[in-house]
Image (cartoon, grey):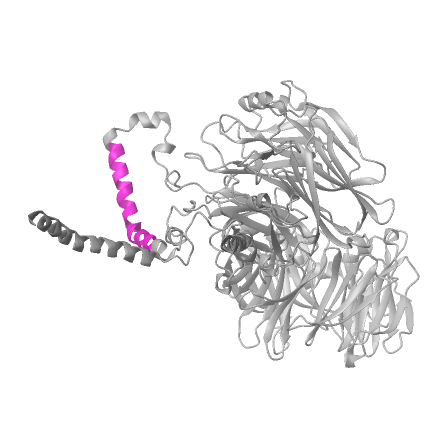
Amino acid sequence: MRRLLAPRIFAFVILTLTLFVELVSSLYANQAGVIDWHHQYIGTPKVSFFHKFVSRGAYVLIASDRNVLASINVRSGNIDWRQVFDENENILAFKGYENTAISVSQRDNDYIVRSWESHSGFMLWENRIKNVRIDKNSNPIIENDAPGVDVIFAANNLGILILLEGSTVINLNVTDGSQMWRSDLTDSSTIFYKLVEFKEKAYGVGLKKSFSSYTIEVITYDITNGISKLQSLNSKVGNIKDMIVLGGSIQDGFIIWNEGGFIRVNRLGTLVIEQSSLEELYENVIPSFANANGKLALLDLNLGSRTEFLVEVPTKEGNTAAVFKVDSESGRLVALYDLEEKSENSLYSATFDKNSRLIISRSRVVAEDVAKVDIIAPGTGLVLGNYEIPYSLNSYGDLKKTVLDVDSKATGYRMLVTSADGSIHFWKDHDMVWKSEESLAHTIEAEFLDLPERKLWTQEVDELAEQPEESETISPLARYIRRVKTHIEQLKDFPAYLTAYVQRFIIGDHEAELRFTDKSKFSLHRDTFGFRKLLIFVTRTKLVALDTINKGQIIWSRYFGNDVFEFNKIFIVRSSTVKYPPLVVAIGIQRDSKGKIVTRLFRLNALTGENFIPTENEKYFPSELSLPIITKRILKLPVEEPDERTHIIALIDEELKFHIYPNHENAVKAFIQFAPSFYFTLSDDIGEKSLKGYKVVKNNVQPFDITEVWILNFPEGESIAAIGRRPQNEKIASLGRVLGDRSVLYKYLNPHLVAIATLSTSKTPATLNIYLIDIVKGSILHHATHENVGYLHPIRIAQIENSIVYHFWSENYNEKGYVAVVYELYESEIKDQRFESPVFSSFAHERPYVSAQAYMFPYGINAIGVTITKHGIATREFLFALDTDQVFGVSKRFLDPRRPQRVLTNEDKEEMLIPYDPAIPDNKKWVLSYHLPVAGIRQIITSPALLESTTLVLAYGLDLWFTREAPSKTFDVLSEDFSKGTLLATIFGLILGILITKPMVRRKKVNARWY
């Protein structure tokens, strides 16, 4: 008996270890960054400035529209540090002083002031300021033109003065941020927007609403105690943009404004006003202003205590500008320099060199691929340099903002440039030193694009691209000669190919072949295992294509800001084929000449980003199309038109009209054949209180009419919180789940199933309801309720095959925390039993059997993805974007409702079930992104490789992170540590042994015959 027991124990141990093999998988340190890459972004700068440290030189400090503070190394463009705020905490101000920087942000009704170490990003202190109130509706200045927030640093460390909401001034201690005094202004008709400090006095400058204009008001504070005095200036200002405030700190401050044909100047703290006539300015002082034909603009050069500023005037030939200064002694306006050159889109910025000499830059785009920068010293009239820098107008749009700096150790300039698409560029003299594609921080959607095989597609196709008429005129001999020439031309790549092939075979470097072809004309093709794809991103006004293999290198980018106000969708309508390139359609909105919103569609070659115009049928396939509609829903239909083999796109407008693109005759015929089986939903956005199902009315009139088939009104107080939809590219390998006793539970595979999560917040804590709905007839196939749910935490839901996973926060006293629930849907609870009908129909009365289980989850999440493989054979893995900025992978075997709550039986072991545990383990080895901080993840998308074991994963939001994941291990490819050299040596050794021993054996056999 003991002899029989020992082998059983040994077998049980081996089986248990086998079950947990994939649980202990992890990434070695030397593998980090090999199969994955990470792009960090900060967003488009709202505030940016050069900040010079005493011991470390200059860095760029930035506050972005993605609520990120960052320090950028000017030499490399790398992010030295960044602080990512919550999405609902808006950064309003950011200012540097010596080795610190102050940020002001708003979250709900509170303002948060923080002090940071400039060189490290370490937070020194924080002060949360409450009870700041103002009625913005009574005065539109803050909402439309100025934030009503400002920060100044008082001399002699007397404090940091903060202006909030244009109505509250607070003085904070420099060391610990404690409040020294506070002043709340009660007059809601006055909005202050600027603070200036000089000689222990602080001046708040604002505008008071009068009948037809604004009056300038100045409030003076004693910095030491906060005692204030309010003054009104004799002034009429039409708009806050007609006024600027200069100076302060080491000299008097001044207000300059445009009023009634004069530029007027007031020295802060007095009621004295100096003025200069615009007529005299135009005719006698600044020659380039002579032909002015519009309103001048006052431009603040942000020079701190300096009083120089810019006046820009429109003329018939273009805009021109001049530099002025307020004389600190007399308080009068002094003209310094006429910039003369006229252009439409010049940008100006300024700084001063080590000798306190004012330096001004003028930047503009002068050609499709060239930008020009002039560096001028207005005080001496010297033009210090004229530079031309490579710049793609097609990729980045026009220039939007420039920040100038002069290197104290050199004679050249350097400049931080923000372009219209949101990207950042760093220029130095004639060169673009680095750039950062910050538009990707505003990604709306992303898609994987399969690249064509090299043998089926090249960018110089010969026979495949021929028209029938051309083929008839080419003789077989000419065709043969052309093909021989092609082969001879390709011979030059053979040595590199042979080297790459040997390298791939010996050390398993499967990307070596791609590296040698990247420089050739056949660069855009897929690799052996399908790891190389294009990632097509659509941002607010731009499309960008990245290469998954080459660390996310940009293949092409294209700016559409002049044609589109904002993109909202992108679809891959045609994948790679033998003759035709892959196509994408980007859809956005724009205002026409009458101010009405129209929908724009762009049809692009996915390999180049250029408009795709077919050689035939150009009339039916326009590369650009405008529709005078506002879309309510946009769908890619699972049907192709026969001419170009592209998927048809459906657009439902606000009047519930159904448009298709393309809409030629054959496309309409293909859609009409498909329409009877097509059902869709509207009003399924987050926050909606009902769900409606529609179908298209069968007719030949375009646009098509749609009719409401059903409506599902959720109970009072409930609204949609999350929606789960099955991925379009999912593959299902098996129709059932094989159990340990070889019986089968058949999966409920309803292509029309949608999982809806609703929240009822009529009482606290809230109630979460889960509905499984068939969108064909609107029937509820399953309904579950969770009480005591935290509504402040997001609800996330994912759907794949017959599985549904959702995640929420539970307020239950005995299980307070995050919960993940998994459903599996089967045709029957009884083994080997299926629905009676051999064909699935949504109109049948059968309902699925739902197997469900809940698990405590260790983290909050922002998104859920799921791995998809080529045939759906490999074990699935759910990918969670954690609120800790990491990607966490949990095998489907852990999120399994069939995990037994008892001792495992032999059948359970045969099915490879894992014993039930109420909590998903917090296993750090499951963190796919290891130590990388992948900030702001909003979505995780996946795509299958050619290897069944491997899935390509992309997480995007603020950052981009890409990797390859193999949930069931790479069972279909040799591992990297497999010694192919040893294998070859063994084979050659065996061959050599055979060659040596074969004659010996033959002689032995011959000798044996003689004896």
Left or right: 381, with 806 as reference point: left
Task: Report the residue that reaches farthest toward the top.
Answer: 699
Q: Where's residue 608, x and y in %?
A: 48, 44
Task: Report the residue that reaches farthest toward the left.
Answer: 1010
Q: Where's residue 204, x and y in %?
A: 84, 67
Q: Residue at x 53, y 62 (%)?
A: 434
**In the rendered picture of this protein, how many numbered marks are placed on residues?**
0
Left or right: 461, with 479 as reference point: right
Examine the image and state in which quarter residue 274 appears.
Answer: bottom right
Examine the image and state in which quarter residue 91 appears.
Answer: bottom right
Q: Is residue 960 visible to us here?
A: yes
Magenta highlight on residue 484: yes
Along the viewing direction, whichever of 970 and 164 lies nearer the viewer: 970
Task: Report the residue that reaches farthest toward the front.
Answer: 1
Q: Where's residue 811, x and y in %?
A: 80, 52
Q: Where's residue 190, x and y in %?
A: 88, 59
Magenta highlight on residue 210: no
Left or right: 809, with 586 as reference point: right
Q: Residue at x 51, y 66 (%)?
A: 429
Say above or below: 178 vs 312: below
Say above or below: 296 vs 174: above
Give the dominant element type of the magenta stretch: helix, strand or loop.
helix
Q: Is residue 338 visible to us here?
A: no
Q: Residue at x 46, y 28 (%)?
A: 616
Along the viewing direction, whichever of 601 and 866 lies nearer the viewer: 866
Read off the magenta span: 478-502
Task: Report the residue that reaches farthest toward the right.
Answer: 186
Along the viewing direction, whichever of 286 and 643 lies nearer the viewer: 643
